[in-house]
Image: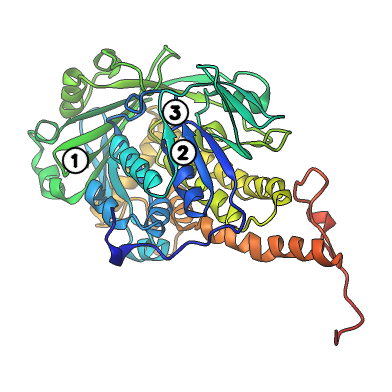
Amino acid sequence: MSSDSERSPVPLRASLAIDFLVVGGGIAGLASAVALSRAGHRVLVLEKSDGLRNRRAGGVRIPPNMSKILFHWGLKSDLRRIALTSQPILFSRFEDADLLGIQLWDNELLRDTQGEFMLTTHADLHDLLYETAIGQGAKIRNNAEVVAIDCDNSSVELASGEILTADVIIGADSERGISRQTVIGQEDRGTFIGLSMFDATFSTAIATKDLTPELAQIINVEGGTVYMAFGNGCAASGYPIHQHKEVAFHFILRDDRPDGAYGDPPTGDLASRVPDPCDTRLRLVANLSTNAVRVPIKDYADLQDWIHESEKLVLVGQAAHPFPPGSIQGTAMATEDAAVLAKLFAHLSTRDQIPSFLWAYQDLRLGRCTSVRNTEVSTIAWMTMENGPEQRMRDDGMRAKFRAGKNVMEGEDGEEDAPQWEEIRTIFGYNCEDEADNWWIKWGLLREHAKETGGVRSPWRESNRFDWGNVAIRVSENVGE
């Protein structure tokens, strides 16, 4: 754990502590446990697996908008122990490793975000959050599968028949879990888009063998280089993990099988799905990989509400807003969800605040997550662009900037940056905890004052959803009072 000198400031703790049941012990569930425990609440996490099956070996990228949260939670030194800091991004063609260019992180941008772009594994991040949650006082039960949620009684039933109750139930059990199904009233299988992501790790020594002289001059294996390869309807990315001893790969490939999920046994289909022609190193990884897991990419309809009508169950992470597998921001959005929930519930003083805090959470998060997910989906489409005029325009533009010694995603002098880069800058710079604090200052305190004095009509409908049209302030004529 972090040293005393790097511990976070003492967090605000709620004057009224309540009980939270978290369904799902993945990153979203553990982040929720850490955040809410820091805010003084009692948290029990229920994980259906043995605690090992939901820890996958594949890579995870931690963007600045996520790392800044973990830093604030006092985990900076722990992250530096398990993660590498990303430096340049190298772009090439999937078919032949033809170099398209490089993109260096803007140091000023990273300073402004108050975070770093870091590279680690899902298992290492999971272990860190698990240990932190336990250290904060949360309880975690493995082999505790939730088979039913009774929102009216704020309870869950385990496969063993045991009934557990809480003040609030948090659904952190993914897009396939019982929590999302309970909120929308039916199972949501999503729509397969004909692409799958294959998640694999591989030896660095083998993956970087026989580099071309051009690439050898640019790549510093010890420097945290992220590799991106664009192909005809396919793409691949790779980045160092485990202190540069391994490389995590994400292959996005055409596929006709909609089955597969994290936690499944490794598949032998990666090699057959990688098209020819192919960069010899990518082909080597595909042919020799023994731990690739297939996860189909599906499109899910946006939910109108993440909160059950009983106002006892709320969704976080993939259960609320499924991101494509392998996307940069999926894990980050789950962590932001947890941070915002905790920031709001740190102000809890009476139980009648619970519904309003839940709806405030949704109001703060739904638009943000929808926008970021749309960016991630657009990025996949941009990376897997089929060969043709648009693809050639993209590649030729990147090559021209590289030859001119420029970052390939940034605009020419006097021009705007590439849309993808502008969106990334905006996403990285967002501070979800500041947004939650601003909500409390602007509306939470106003609502509390309204309850006490009746001088301000609450901007919340009877359902506790925020209603901007109901904001009205009555000015007292007795100014001196």
Discs 3/2, front: 3
Query: Type of residue at label 2?
Result: Ala
**In the image: residue 447, left or right of residue 84:** right
Q: Earlier in the sequence, mark 1 or mark 2?
A: 2
Residue 33 in view, yes or no: yes
Residue in view at x 33 percent, y 61 percent: 106
Query: Which residue has dot 1 on it?
Result: 242
Query: Type of residue at label 3?
Result: Glu
Residue in view at x 16 percent, y 19 percent: 288
Q: Are dots 3 and 2 in contact, CB under 8 Å?
A: no
Q: Which of the two residues, 91 or 469, is positioned nearer the viewer here? A: 469
Provide the secondary structure element on which disc 1 rests.
loop
Query: Which residue has dot 2 on it?
Result: 28
In this rendering, is residue 224 above or below 264? below
Provide the secondary structure element on which disc 3 rests.
loop
Q: Residue furthest right?
A: 477
**In the image: residue 167, left or right of residue 404:** right
Residue in view at x 31 percent, y 29 percent: 56
Provide the secondary structure element on which disc 2 rests.
helix
Residue in view at x 61 percent, y 46 percent: 367
Q: How many marks?
A: 3
Query: Which residue has dot 3 on it?
Result: 47
Q: CA distance from mark 1 to mark 2?
A: 23 Å
